[in-house]
Amino acid sequence: MTDHPSHSPSPPDPAACDRAMGEALDWLIRLQCASAEDTQAFEAWLEADPANAPAYVEAEALWNGNTLRQAAGQLHEKRKPSPLARLRPHWKPLATAAVLLVGVFTVGNLPVRLQADHLTVVGERQRVQLDDGSRVLLNTNSAFSSNIDTRQRVARLYQGEAFFEVTAGRTQPLELQAGPLRASVRDSDFAVRYLNGEAQVRVQRGDVDLLASSDQRIRLSSGDSIRVGPNGFSQRERADLQKDLAWVEGRLIFENCPLSQVLAELRRYYPGWIISTNGALDQVAVTGNYRLDQPLEAVRSLAHITSAQVREFPAVVILN
């Protein structure tokens, strides 16, 4: 009998590992302010090489760990020469990421952070009591401020979503600004969402007077909904308040909604990336009622009802 030599798996190619790690770190930076095209390119990159997803997971762990902070600290120690030269090759882009991270979060969000009195992170809701007695519920990833005294009642939603409860009894109306939208309110409960340059108003109770940046004016009443963009108002619609304002009660409700839209909404509440790599799933109609503080459980449930598979990483969930 002839003995055949055993073959152990080939060790990973160091150059390939460094390439994957470098690209993963580049993606971590790029995804901080990602466009739809960035998201599609990231999905393609994950599928292009089996080494890419594990590299991204490792990079994300480094990104959230002490290594990033240490690298940033080294870069700011002016007395020590060339701290980059002492880092392992695949940590060099990590040190660069430390510098870019400062730019992404302190420069990119600086206008909002300087102006806002109240900020919520992804997945967080916050209740705010205004000085005039009005109440505001801020939804996920929102920024808000108010300036109320004897002469004015002004509130500003810089980004995100908020539900307002404004009661009668004041001479001056509450003036709300959100991008291209100006709202004047005396006695109403209503919600405003301001994302990607477009505002949407949904009225639960009372009347809301709206002014668009194009000088258009309209009054909304209970059950009305409208969008406001740079070109003015859309057509007035009747809102499904039980579904559209479910987030106020901590729920997300979908009725015969394409899976692509469901995932887009869940991404607003998940502090990572939810990615679908199967285009055939995009138009699958979904009906469900989910807790907004458990977006990952919602994704798992969606995978079950659509017979899809889920791969979970520390900051990435892939549905295919």
Image (tube, rainbow, N blue to C red):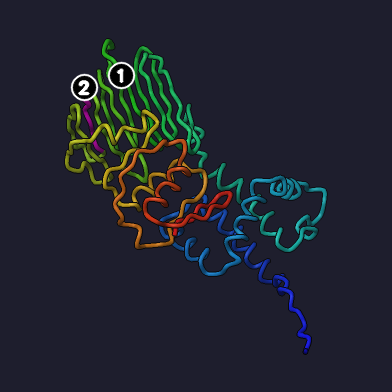
Of the two numbered discs 1 and 2 on the same chain, state the one appearing first in sequence. Answer: 1
Q: Residue at x 82, y 51 (%)?
A: 80
Q: Residue furthest top?
A: 169
Q: How many marks?
A: 2
Q: State which quadrant residue 221 falls in.
A: top left
- Amino acid type, mark 2: Gly
Indicate left or right for 92 with 30 as reference: right
Q: State which quadrant residue 254 falls in.
A: top left
Of 54 and 300, the residue lying toward us: 300
The alpha-carbon separation of the residues under discs 1 and 2 comes to 10 Å
Residue 262 rendering spot, x and y as whole percentages = 35, 47
Residue 285 rendering spot, x and y as whole percentages = 29, 51
Q: Residue at x 56, y 43 (%)?
A: 105
Q: Which residues are magenta?
A: 207-212
Prevailing secondary structure class for the magenta stretch in the rendered image:
strand
Neighbor class of circle 2 (other Cα within 10 Å; few <14, some 14-19, many 20+) is some
Indicate left or right for 184 with 8 as reference: left
Residue carrying label 1: 166
Above or below for 282 versus 231: below
Above or below for 179 versus 11: above
Q: Residue at x 41, y 29 (%)?
A: 138
Q: Residue furthest front?
A: 1
Q: Quadrant location of the C terminus?
A: bottom left
- Amino acid type, mark 1: Val
Above or below for 128 versus 96: above
Residue carrying label 2: 206
